[in-house]
Amino acid sequence: MIRKPILEILVTYRSRWKRVFITAQRYKTPIHPGRQSLKKHSNPTKLNFKDTTMSQTQSLPKIFIIGGTGAQGSSVIHSLALSHKYHCVVLTRNPSSPRATSLSSLPNVSFLTGSFASEATLRTGFTGCTGAFVNIDGFNCGEKTETYWAMRAYELALECGVEIFVYGNIDFGYRLSGYDAACRCGHVDGKGRVGEWILWQNERNGGRMKAGLLTTGPYMNMTVAQGMPMSVSLETPKMKGGADDDDDDDDDDGVVAMWRMPLGPEQGEGGGAVPFVSLEDTGVYALWMFDHPDEASGLNLKTAIGHFDFTEVARAFETVTGHPARYIDTPFSSYWATGPLSSRAEEPSAYNSTLDDPSAMTVRQNFTGWWETYRRSGGGGNKGVLTRDYELLDRIFPERVRSVEEWLRREDGRGRERGDGGLWERVRRGRVRAVTKKNDEGWEGAL
């Protein structure tokens, strides 16, 4: 719980944070990562809320961030910058974009304009930095391009004298499934393949530059935001799938929050499970890795809230909002006919790739393998293809989110504090903010 003296200091330091920390006190939960100490850890990451002068900012160790305006990168920057231990140098193609503008209001943040697909730009960014966080957007460039530039980013960081390299990773599901073609997923494999290569490189280069993986998975936000592979739909007895077309938006009679997903039956009945991630916690894990480079070196820190199916998502949503919710196990044929990504099914999964390239995958091919991997990760929890060490996560971040219901309650509170309304009101009107940058930018943009 945030104590009153700290709250008063923060309000004095920057008035715009006032509502955020009042909410933190009200709900007794961290509104954003980086706000509570990891006091139970043997060598805790202590978070410092003091003001920082310009000279202090210039003397802070610099962390070069690739992918900082994305969903995960933004959380990492908030935690690093607000710890007042690090200065974040954020690579962006457009420092005037809404996401970059939002980050510019934080202390200890500066920008380098350019693209990750430029050796000159990468050298400029890495030079003079103590650490690096690299998370290239595979939905922008595609698996082949991401593989090349992620490997070059590691090599250039080593060349430029970076001391700790944290790679934004995803589980290499294709390899973990025993190289089963049914689990082939381009945007996942592009990261996981490089992640394993980085750990192998670290065995040889760890004395010169330490490297570790921050592994995530589907964000809980994806279940309630629009345009995501797991997006909720609102249905009435008169309709199947899609948003309610009733003209009276305030009439909730009979409206059910519905997840029609191809995850299989409940976990206990042989169905799949998803190791859902709290974006708001991701930054804390990244901060811990930079604070503890010796422990982070060679570590694949696989993060998650827990392994959950959509029966649990629906149950928790109904508990938090007071409105009915259901999960319907859906065959792939129906999912691709009417599901949230059906209109893009035959498009390239990366908007700067082309299907003329034999390495490219369609959205249908990519996300069919994605879902199949999670279908094989159930078995009653944490027993399938994708697993997590939850005891390690508890040690690193004792205050982490541990359940779907807890995350939904926090998201409900965040929306109310911003003045956007509770979770049900936002879902009902399609006002849950986009999670990924590709959705914000309409699946288009430069490398």
Image: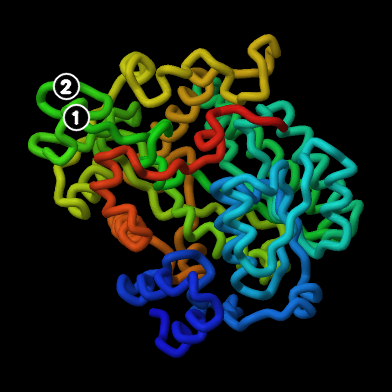
Residue 102 placement (x, y as % from top left): 57, 55
Mark 1 secondary-structure assignment:
strand
Q: Residue at x 63, y 81 (%)?
A: 51
Residue 130 placement (x, y as % from top left): 80, 65
Residue 235 badge: 1
Give the quadrant of the C terminus. top right
Residue farthest to the bottom, as pictured? 5
Q: Residue at x 75, y 40 (%)?
A: 150
Task: Check the image and report above or below for 348 versus 420.
Answer: above
Q: Residue at x 36, y 34 (%)?
A: 231
* Quadrant assignment, res 228: top left
Task: Check the image and report above or below for 396 versus 90.
Answer: below
Q: Nearer the viewer, residue 319 or 200?
A: 319
Is residue 75 toward the left or the right of residue 168 in the image? left
Residue 142 placement (x, y as % from top left): 66, 27
What amino acid does circle 1 point to?
Glu
- Is residue 141 visible in the rendered structure shown here? yes
Number of residues whose C-alpha sits closer than 10 Å to that of mark 2, classed few (under 14), some (14–19) or many (20 or more): few
Residue 349 placement (x, y as % from top left): 57, 23
Q: How is the image coloured?
A: rainbow
Number of residues whose C-alpha sits closer than 10 Å to that of mark 1, classed few (under 14), some (14–19) or many (20 or more): many
Give the quadrant of the N terminus. bottom left
Task: Check the image and report above or below for 226 versus 409.
Answer: above
CB under 8 Å between callouts 2 and 1?
yes
Q: Residue at x 84, y 38 (%)?
A: 118
* Quadrant assignment, res 288: bottom right
Residue 356 badge: none
Is residue 392 toward the left or the right of residue 126 in the image? left
Is residue 385 toward the left or the right of residue 104 in the image? left
Residue 239 badge: 2
What amino acid does circle 2 point to?
Met
